[in-house]
Image (spheres, grey):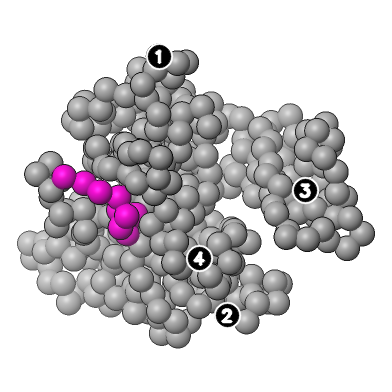
Amino acid sequence: MGLFGSQKLAVGLDIGSGAIKIVQLKKKGGKVADYTLMALGSLDLNPEAVVDDTIIDSGAVVDAIRSIFEDQSIKAQYTGVALSGNSVIIKKVTLPAMSEEELDETIQWEAEQYIPFDIRDVNIDYHIVPRGAEGPGGEMDVLLVAAKKDKITDYTGVISQAGKIPAFVDVGAFALQNAFEINYPEELDGTLALINVGASLTSVTVLRQGASTFWRDIPLAGDKYNEAIRKELSLSYEQAEALKKGEPVEGVSAAASLPLINGVSQRIAAEIQKTLNFYLDSAGEGRIEKIFLSGGSCKVAGFDQILGERFRVPVETFNPFLRIGYNTKHFDPEYINHSAPMFAVAVGLALREVGE
């Protein structure tokens, strides 16, 4: 047994504002995309436990992590988690060409020019983006990522307190891309948008020829449906959540909530459109050719049609289990097909190897 024992892949744990999602995969043989689903589950969180991707009630989150591991009979210890929101900054910068050793030595100084936080308060990582050919004047593109140390400590802390071992902290947008690349290799040509609609954030990632070129988090997401329904129809959080999902609520017809739901969908779609228009204008791109939707709130009735009408492109629901096998005796295909989009980030995390 090596340093990490027999666990090759991390357990993917997506701690969101509305729920915790967990995925465990097994990699078979030497094939890159040959994976089998071993465990998955979700557990709703109290709305006050995690607010805007900030852990407020760590005790509740620790209890939830313990419960979901136990409920899914997951014995593995090494666990990967993702950060999103305003505690993470992603910048693609152009620097003078240099070796990785030189970049290692200068990256902190370079990062100070692009990161709007005190450099002492963040952890810095980077990735050199292949250009195919060296740019004019001997330049190189570098993907620069900075995450606030206190937020990293919060997320790794609840994992440790739950008796598990933090294997890594990823960025939600990168985990989403990881899951997409494995499941949709044939879609990596052209320019497409991955839109993940969570409880408090909608993340927008643009892929061009398979490479990330743009990332933005919009603080407008699934919670806004609940707020509108609760305010206008005087319902509880649980009742509003049910109506948002298209489930019946005693005394309230689906027709009564539909105008409210459509109104919020139009607001979110308008913000997505502004965000993507900004990218297209600044990058000199012609258009987004296709949109893939994921996240716990992406299947709100009519949302995909509203986006399709605004952008006049195909809108497809992202299935992170499309190329991942599973035993139908252990997993209900109907549940997986219905719930797949909300597990996209967790799958992306679960695809990473421990110690990678």
Badge 3 density bin: few <14, some 14–19, many ≥20, Cα 10 Å:
some
Neighbor class of circle 1 (other Cα within 10 Å; few <14, some 14-19, many 20+) is few
Which range is magenta? 319-327
Name which residue type carries label 2: Arg
Q: Is residue 325 magenta?
A: yes
Q: Percent x, y for residue 311? A: 48, 82
- Residue that numbered label 4 is attached to: 188
Could you tell me which residue is drawn at 35 percent across and 46 percent down?
Answer: 34
Mark 3 to mark 2: distance in Å? 28 Å
Specify which label sits upstream in the sequence, 3 or 1: 1
The structure residue drawn at horizontal position 32% and vertical position 55%, both measured from the top left corner, is: 323
Residue that numbered label 1 is attached to: 1
Q: Is residue 169 left or right of residue 256?
A: right
Q: Is residue 2 left or right of residue 96?
A: left
**Mark sitting on residue 114:** 3
Amino acid carrying label 3: it is Tyr
Q: Is residue 255 found left or right of 293 in the rendered image?
A: left
Numbered-mark total: 4
* Residue 154 painted magenta: no
Q: Judge whether 4 appears above or below 274 on screen.
A: above
Provide the residue designation for mark 2.
287
How far is mark 4 from mark 3, CA to CA? 29 Å
Q: Nearer the viewer, mark 4 or mark 2?
A: 4
